[in-house]
Image (cartoon, rainbow, N blue to C red):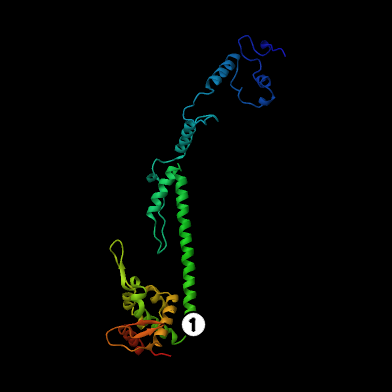
Amino acid sequence: MDFNLSEHCNDDGSFIDPAALRTLAGPEHAESKAFDDIKDFRSLVKVHADTKSALGKKLDNVIQKPAADASDEDKAAYKASLKAELGAVKSGAEYEFTRPELPAGMHYDEAFEAQAREMLAAAGIPKDEAKAIYDGYSNYQIARYNAAAEAETKQVKADDDQLRTDWAGEKMVVNPRLALAAMKALGAEAFPKLWNGWTEADGAEVKGLEVRLKEAKIFDSPGDLAKWRACGVDTSMLRLYCVLGQKMVGAKMLTGDGTGKPTVKVGGKEITEAQQNEVDAVNAQTKWE
């Protein structure tokens, strides 16, 4: 198809009908706005030249995606540029996390926060996203802790209610005192660290069960399960040592020589006269069934 430029341009180079340029460009450009500012042939040539020269040129303040065959270094630089533009940090210390309000008994993990900061920074996570991730995780952990605490509270109540049912009436006085007698007789040997106490790595002294029970005056309020639990004794431990106490009450006396050697056998195990004296002292103060 022949093209006659004079049919479209005046003698001075201006277009006779600028809108006709869209027709010359083809039907796919019928609605294009690219020709709105082109009034003559000279401006058309200039726009074409400027466009060609701009192709392939790196634009200022524009992060250009590397070609598919770009080097790994170029691709890495591109990713780093994107992350920096989105707010990535150089150090985890730059993040601004919200320190959550923890429920009673929950410990805040300072070491985990420090590790999380560096992990997020190394991954190039922007400030706002890192805050959303960490705060969300903290809230999730708190929710888990609360759920576990609630479940434990319910279980404790169920265990206490069952024990009170099983040990109704005078048993709620007699049986705990039996358990106490057994703990006093066997504690130092059965669980010496728990019974005598220990020293933590930081030098803090932890009271043993013997001292805790004495300070709580457990003998005077044997049915107070909350007081037992505060000392570190739950219902399962009470049940166990109650059985041991019952065995001790029914122990058979053996012949002793007065030297402090074992004189009483409890469930196949011998105990000393001093230990038996403790049991006798408890028996003397307790109304047995």
Residue 146 position in % (x across, y down): 47, 63
Q: Position of residue 270 (x, y in %)?
A: 36, 82
Residue placed at 34% from the left, 75% from the top?
189
| Mark 1 residue type | Asp
| Quadrant hosting residue 13 | top right
The image quadrant that residue 10 belongs to is: top right
Judged left or right of residue 31, residue 234 is left
| Quarter of the image that includes the N terminus | top right
Q: Which residue is drawn at 47% across and 46% down?
A: 129
Read off the residue under disc 1: 166
Answer whether residue 222 is visible to the viewer in this image.
no
The residue at the far top in this view is: 11
Q: Height in image: 32 above or below 248?
A: above
With 126 as the anchor, is 183 left or right in this view?
left
- Quadrant where the image shows the C terminus: bottom left
Q: Which of 205 and 4 is in front in this view?
A: 205
x and y percentages locating residue 181 in the rendered image: 36, 82
- Judging depth in this view, the residue of 101 and 44 nearest the camera is 101
Determine crowd level at label 1: few under 14, some 14-19, many 20+ residues with C-alpha closer than 10 A: few
Q: What element carries label 1?
A: helix
Q: Can residue 225 be seen in this view?
A: yes
Compared to residue 75, the image places residue 36 above or below, namely: above
Residue at the image position 41 percent from the left and 47 percent from the top:
117
